Image (cartoon, rainbow, N blue to C red):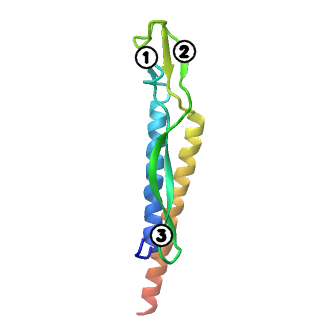
Amino acid sequence: MAAGLSIFDISGRAMSAQLVRLNTTASNLANAGTVAGSEAEAFRSMKPVFRTVMDGAGRATVAVDQVTTSKMAPTKRHDPDNPLADADGNVWEAAVDSAAELVEMVETARQYQNNVQVLDTAKGLINETLRLGQ
């Protein structure tokens, strides 16, 4: 990256990454408890993978590299009355740890709020600097 990153670039990109993280967590929670007729069709939680983006001056921010699917196996449950059940009467519940996803959501919201505070502080400092020249 040839151009320098400002505080607004750094925090803005971090907020964007946290938004992706929050959206994947919300999707995981929305699909928790869903069932499928086979293990292959069952929902698996998603996680974003981040990478560091640096400028020429050594300043760094973050970017979403990819969104991966969990390797956690869905849970097989015997439920012959379920319309999605296979020939043996089994369904597979989504591979989502709801408690871990809730913790992830709280942490993500805090990270996002921290970046909002950084932007507010930077804006306030710029405004105060401009007032000094008046």
Residue on which the image places disc 1? 37
Residue on which the image places disc 2? 77
Q: Residue 133, percent across and down?
A: 42, 93
Identified at 41% across, 75% down, the residue is 2
**Amino acid identity at mark 3:** Asp
Disc 3/disc 2 C-alpha distance (Å): 50 Å
**Amino acid identity at mark 2:** Arg
Residue on which the image places disc 3? 120
Quarter of the image with the C terminus in it: bottom left
Q: Secondary structure at mark 3?
A: helix
Disc 3/disc 1 C-alpha distance (Å): 49 Å
| Front position in the image: 67 or 111 | 67
**Nearest-to-viewer mark from 3 and 2:** 2
Q: For mark 3, does the 10 Å Cα neighbourhood hold few (<14), some (14 to 19), or many (20 or more) residues? A: few
Above/below status of 70 relative to 129: above
Q: Residue 96, percent across and down?
A: 53, 32
**Amino acid identity at mark 1:** Gly
Identified at 47% across, 70% down, the residue is 120
